[in-house]
Amino acid sequence: MPTLRLALCQVNPTVGDLVGNADLVRRWTRQAAEAGAQLALFPELMLTGYPVEDLVFRRSFVAASKAALEQLATDLAADGLGDLPVLVGYLDADGPPQVSADAQPGRGARNAAALLHRGTVVGTYFKHHLPNYGVFDEDRYFVPGDTLLVVRIGGVDVALTICEDLWQAGGPFAVARRAGVGLVLNINGSPYELNKDDIRLPLVRRRAAEAGATIAYVNMVGGQDELVYDGDSMIVDATGALLARAPQFVEHLLVHDVDLPPAKEPVEGDEEIADDMRIVHTKISDILPPAPTGALARGGIIEPVADEAEVWQALVLGLRDYVDKNRFPSVVLGLSGGIDSAVVAALAVDALGPDRVVGVSLPSQHSSAHSRADAEELAKRTGLDYRVEPIQPMVDAYLANISLSGVAVENLQARVRGVILMALSNQEGHLVLTTGNKSELAVGYSTLYGDSVGGYNPVKDVWKTLIWRLAKWRNADATRRGETPPIPENSIGKPPSAELSPGQLDSDSLPEYDVLDPILIGYVDGDLGRDGLIASGHDPAMVDKVLRMVDTAEYKRRQSAPGTKISIKAFGRDRRLPITNRWREHG
Amino acid sequence: MPTLRLALCQVNPTVGDLVGNADLVRRWTRQAAEAGAQLALFPELMLTGYPVEDLVFRRSFVAASKAALEQLATDLAADGLGDLPVLVGYLDADGPPQVSADAQPGRGARNAAALLHRGTVVGTYFKHHLPNYGVFDEDRYFVPGDTLLVVRIGGVDVALTICEDLWQAGGPFAVARRAGVGLVLNINGSPYELNKDDIRLPLVRRRAAEAGATIAYVNMVGGQDELVYDGDSMIVDATGALLARAPQFVEHLLVHDVDLPPAKEPVEGDEEIADDMRIVHTKISDILPPAPTGALARGGIIEPVADEAEVWQALVLGLRDYVDKNRFPSVVLGLSGGIDSAVVAALAVDALGPDRVVGVSLPSQHSSAHSRADAEELAKRTGLDYRVEPIQPMVDAYLANISLSGVAVENLQARVRGVILMALSNQEGHLVLTTGNKSELAVGYSTLYGDSVGGYNPVKDVWKTLIWRLAKWRNADATRRGETPPIPENSIGKPPSAELSPGQLDSDSLPEYDVLDPILIGYVDGDLGRDGLIASGHDPAMVDKVLRMVDTAEYKRRQSAPGTKISIKAFGRDRRLPITNRWREHG
């Protein structure tokens, strides 16, 4: 039985950075070669990053992607790495978009994978199943492939597949069984979602059983706008046994020796089959890196961590990559002394270090003494750059010139804070972080152009009750490691308040969060209607109250900053509702 | 040869308003009946409005849509209108979404049309071609239909189709020829786009030739978020002759008698055919409204108007419907004396009347005397509610407390204006209108949370050079009608300036707009890359300068207010680019 040493390269590409991403492939291929690998694989659309969205429609970009692939094949050979077969995702197109008198503009490109060997592209696969739900729009961009490429490598028949091909039964994996392959490679750009790692392993196991073959699943890692990729690359054999599994949220080279069945028949030509796909067999040169001697390579199995730790890592990585990939030197945020801004500050310090985080206390006449003290305490514990800018002189200047009352005065204070943070951003170059949690966003409990000001919101997709859990987990984790817990206990324990009017509490306007959040989760994440929510046991009057708030806050949510997505339905990217809309769930 | 009197009901539904939209159908069916119609048709997704976006995923909404359809059939009969067959678009679903262990969430609904007659649904058609390009995401929402329904009505075989079915050759219209129909009904939610009316008629003609049948094309009218539907309903016979055509941008009942070939064979059962569609023949009751006597009904042919008039009407309708459908009492905007705010003010007064428009002059120390005078002159000519709020006291309050310089001070002034407009909005209930044109948005020449503040931007998709053309057209049109031109000539003629620093002009930072706009149009609307733009004759250095600005302004565009889409690629809805993105076209 042949043994192949596989290298799953769980790396962090940057969208649009063809040169930098190709360099990543070269560096990691060298590491893979040094580890004795005989086959290396990189994620989906590795060369372009994922998703490239409407860049697909620009011919100059598609042409550059194809040229970068050819250059990469040449460069790997020049690096002395040509003998190692490398599978890499890239963007392809058959030719210019088809235009007839009636044709609509659109798809013509391919979500492609290329096998590189000895300086050339020796095989190409086009993704068959194109996801077009949730965050995915691949029917907008790509034409599906209809051919399963089976490549004989070192005496083993290996099928190439991409991401969504794994998520559907009866597709390329069923065809792979017909082709009698021993190994299926599956390259991914699979975004993180809370509990998705619990789904992935059983899914890979089912597909391994369907194909009757070992699966090598490699996923990218890193943040891209609202998405964060968690890695979680793995190898599962035909019996469903988990052979190796990479850690989440970090770049990782997973090297593992797998025993594979020898290919049974000679490589043949094309073969038509039933399931709307062709199988094409091919074979690459027998010149491969030599079979490793010495101890077997074992990638090890990293178990996924608990939910809070996992979410924290996702938010840290999403924030760090947004800041660094967009080349911001630093971030600034308002510190109210409350839990949301404390958690965002702690995330920012974990992501960027305290020297790149500016926290500004912006007290008004309604700010309590404990708010200022809690903000200062947070700054002391985390070491961030702390400043105080009282807002009352500016607020008074408006009130002296314009007659305002009620909510207009409350919002005015939040907007003066927004103007100050943006002024600091313009003057000093920081990215402004927004700190509104998902519960606030859902019900519109925020000031447009006030506390919603900012370029990125790390907790945009985090319900308020999860904010508290994260804060407690982060502090406990610090204590466990013998470090200072970053978040003042008083910020965690006190009742939440916007402090925009005397004695104001969130609970004056909103239900308690442990009542509010379950309704929001059912309505937003679960698409439950009023009747469904009531059937789940929620109080009808409370359901009506909450749904009324959510239905009327759509416009504010559209204007909110991007932020890392961690749930099934983050506001923005994968939840699209009309603003002008008379449909109301509430009674 | 049978003659049928058709009524094409070009109406303005509201998304989500099932009750209101059903009432519209009842009222217009009555008018159609009073005009002697024997067949009435309403637009695509008439009952729900279009597009309903992710409301499709809420079972409560789908169930309500289906129930509303049944109720409508009953109500029409109770209204005494049951004999008149009515074709109406609605949202259907086969059942709950399919969920298996591997299945992804998503599509399960149908973009459907129902024929109502004598109190019941007598026929149903599911849209076959689902558009998934530009503003359309129908692969996200719908399962395609595979059956062409042919209904015998008054001795004529009539095929039912929906919107995109018309845009593709070899689809339902080719199948309609196989079925030997005499008339094809095509119901639409087809958004306005500059020059689209020039495409539509030739397209309908080609499809009429393909089907060998008359086509009755009905489109909705009205604004929905960023989309505006222009109507332009029409009837074209099998020879390609245009029989009747409705005006754009207004509700209209187009009643026309058409001579149609009698159905040749008896109604049969199902018939399988080749082009991946089935044909199903059916027949409705022979009880129809009596054949009209007297003069033939002639719908008339309204020729489309010139580009500037057409765009102006689109922007007025989009703005009016956004304000009214969202139930805002009034709008407020800043009047700088410049051309953009003058055009937006004139649009708002045309859309809402002067009593619902508040214009605020917000002068600073850099505002010129002519700016204040031009703003005041505009107010006088249009009759809007005019106010003056000098911003210097508030600007000074910030500068006394925070050390700012350069661009930070320029932006501060724009943000103080934004805070004042939002305060007036909160205090008095107006919707804030944003006035930045598409050229500014493209190159990022605006202040985030400053002049970009607002809930709706009527000129979001209007290039600066078109702003000037619109202003001149509107004034000339007023003169032609013997009215006062609304826009001060000085606002049109003077060089554009942001007036945020002494003597500042747009041309200090930007190329002249007649140089800038053609490059932007090629890059944004045309997806041309650097090489393509240079090949079009643009100066390479200028191309690099402009592309650098566009590439770095993506985040600001994401934060901009919705506004009526009039071009092939409005920012926002149908142009999706990553923010984190290292691909750069410029050298």
Image (spheres, coloured by chain):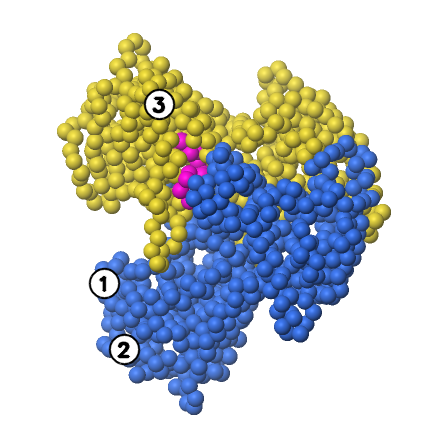
Chain colours: A blue, B yellow
Q: Is A566 positioned to the left or the right of A392 in the image?
A: left
Element at label 3: helix
Q: Which chain contains the residue that carries disc 1?
A: A
In which quadrant is the N terminus of chain A drawn? bottom left
The residue carrying mark 1 is A272
Q: Looking at numbered disc 3 in the image, what kind of residue is underneath it?
A: Asp
Mark 1: which amino acid? Glu
User: Type of residue at label 2?
Assistant: Ala
The single residue placed furthest to the top in the displayed view is B294
**Mark positioned earlier in the residue sequence (2 or 1):** 2
Q: Which span of residues is magenta-colored?
A: B44-61
Circle 2 or circle 1, nearest the eye: 2
Residue A518 placement (x, y as % from top left): 51, 50
Instruction: Examine the structure image and report whether residue B57 is included in the region drawn in magenta.
Output: yes
Query: Badges 3 and 2: C-beta atoms under 8 Å apart?
Result: no
Whether the residues at callouts 2 and 1 have beta carbons within 8 Å, the answer is no
Q: How crowded is mark 2: few (under 14 residues within 10 Å), some or many (20 or more)?
A: some
Evaluate whether label 1 is on the same chain as label 3.
no
Q: Name the residue under label 3.
A: B75
> Label 2 belongs to which residue?
A263
